[in-house]
Amino acid sequence: MIKVVLADDHHLVRQGIRALLERDKRIQIVGEAPNGQEALELIARHQPDVAIVDIRMPMPNGIMVIEQVRALKLPTRVIILSMYMMTRWCAGPYGTARAAICSSIRSLRNCPWLFRRRCRISAI
């Protein structure tokens, strides 16, 4: 079972991602958060395999969530959602094997691929 935390300040975005992910019985959504603080609390409590986090949500933003996950040495992989049309692995200080950044549209379309890359599982 792949445990996932969803964090986005837009409820409809979280609903859409949940609907997409719940099609796969190997994925379990263990929590949803409307802001970075609640996301960090859920990540620390559940230590999910993956956290899908909005880059521009409030209190703190997605980049700060990555920093906190790294500082706490949590095993969670982070997929950052951005409305900017880009797909790349994070570079610079955030460029670790634990973080990816993608446009929201592509993230939804490519979630199985991202999960394979982020969780190192064979197929979803």
Image (cartoon, rainbow, N blue to C red):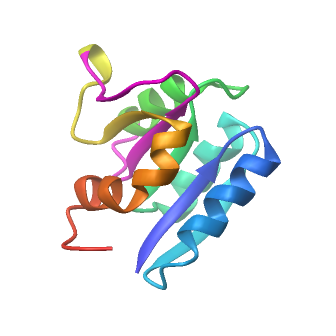
Q: Quadrant of residue 119?
A: bottom left
Camera-nearest residue between 31 and 18 = 18
Camera-nearest residue between 58 and 105 = 105
Left or right? Give the position of 42 relative to 49.
right
Quadrant showing the N terminus:
bottom left
Can you give x and y, in whole percent of width and height, for residue 24 in the image?
Answer: 48, 79
Magenta segment boundaries in residue numbering: 72-91
Q: Residue furthest top?
A: 92
Magenta-colored stretch includes residue 63: no
What is the number of callouts on the image? 0
Q: Quadrant of residue 91?
A: top left
Camera-nearest residue between 109 and 82 = 109
Magenta-colored stretch includes residue 82: yes
Relative to 10, does residue 31 appear above or below in the rendering?
below
Q: Residue furthest right?
A: 11
Quadrant showing the C terminus:
bottom left
Can you give x and y, in whole percent of width and height, for residue 71 in the image?
Answer: 38, 32
Q: Residue at x 59, y 69 (%)?
A: 29
Can you give x and y, in whole percent of width and height, for residue 35 in the image?
Answer: 72, 37
Q: Residue at x 38, y 52 (%)?
A: 76
Can you give x and y, in whole percent of width and height, for residue 63 in the image?
Answer: 49, 24
Relative to 79, does residue 87 appear above or below in the rendering?
above
Q: Residue at x 52, y 53 (%)?
A: 44
Q: Residue at x 46, y 60 (%)?
A: 47
